Image (tube, grey):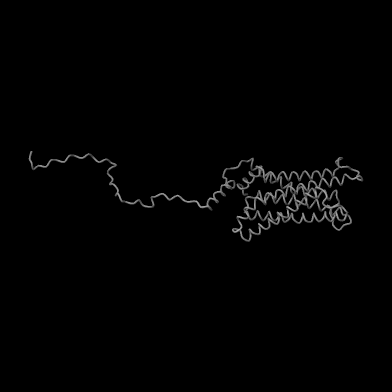
Amino acid sequence: MDSNSVSPMPELAPIAEFDKSPPSPPNEEVPMDDLPPPPATISGNDVKKVKVQRSRSYESDDHERGACEWCEYALIITLATILLIGVSALTIFWVFFYREGYGWADDIPEKQFNLHPTLMVAGFVTFSGFSVLLYRICRCFRRIYVKLLHAIFHALAFPCIVIGFLAVLDFHNKTGIVNFYSLHSWIGLVAMGLFGIQYAVGFFSFLLLLICNKGTAGFRASLVPVHAAFGILTFVLGVAACLTGLTEKALFTFGQDLSTTKYWQMPQEAIVINAIGMSIVAVAIVVLYTVRGTGGYRLRKVAAQHPS
């Protein structure tokens, strides 16, 4: 073999397909656009917003409600409206048909007394009941409109309660009856006192809402559960005052020695008085079921999902 000849190079193995791409330089930087975003930090305000959204999840629940729950919602609204209007209408019918109507400066002081049951039923039951139900059921309206309706119905109830109280107080002074001796009067005084406090607190809160909505949001939010609880208590005490008052009126009317008809004989007027009382009981059941019961929770969900 010639010493000047060059030995042939050994044949290299073929390069695999995955090795054909040139390697990237070792110091090449990865572009920032290809990196995942950094984890977002949640502030305290964001945590509060998340909690509020979770607590109000029933308002944004997208699950379709069944026909039974929608029928329950419509039935409760219809029944409550009929009872709230019907109890005042039945009281007016009783006064005109059996008690000779109304009066103030008349020679018959009983006509002035007739203002007392009519106005107290209208204030404590009808207007207050509508106020509570509107505030709980009308979730499809803007919150400011619901508050305005709530305030209007309470504003209608306030003069009814005041005039009804003055009518019976003047009637007792004219006829020589002692004031505030019965259980009915004691319950009525407590109910009127709570109603006055509730009205003042609600008006003050609503006034703060109109003047400074954002600055007073925390204070008003903390006031809502207290105001709602005492509102239900005031409504229940008003119902109790109306029921004891109707019983007291029936005993006075049919329990006197000069009366030819006794209460236990169930005359027509006594039946009407009992019907008014049972209507008030039915109103209380419907209102409490709607506001505090599980049915109220479902009704608020249906109202939020069916804004029509």
Q: Residue furthest front?
A: 181
The single residue placed furthest to the right in the displayed view is: 258
Identify the image quadrant of residue 76: top right
Number of numbered tags placed on the structure image: 0
Note whether 11 is above or below 97 in the view shown.
above
Provide residue 284's location: percent of width, then percent of height.
Answer: 73, 45
Residue nearest the observer in this picture, 273 or 169: 169
Residue 301 pos. (x, y %): 62, 45
Residue at the farthest bottom position: 211
Horizontal and vertical percent for residue 95? 83, 50
Please tell me which residue is depicted at 78% across the width and 45% down the height of the picture.
Answer: 277
Residue at the farthest left position:
2
**Position of residue 43 in the picture relative to residue 308 (left or right):** left
Quadrant the N terminus occupies:
top left
Q: Residue at x 81, y 52 (%)?
A: 116
Front residue of 305 and 110: 110
Residue 208 position in % (x across, y down): 64, 59
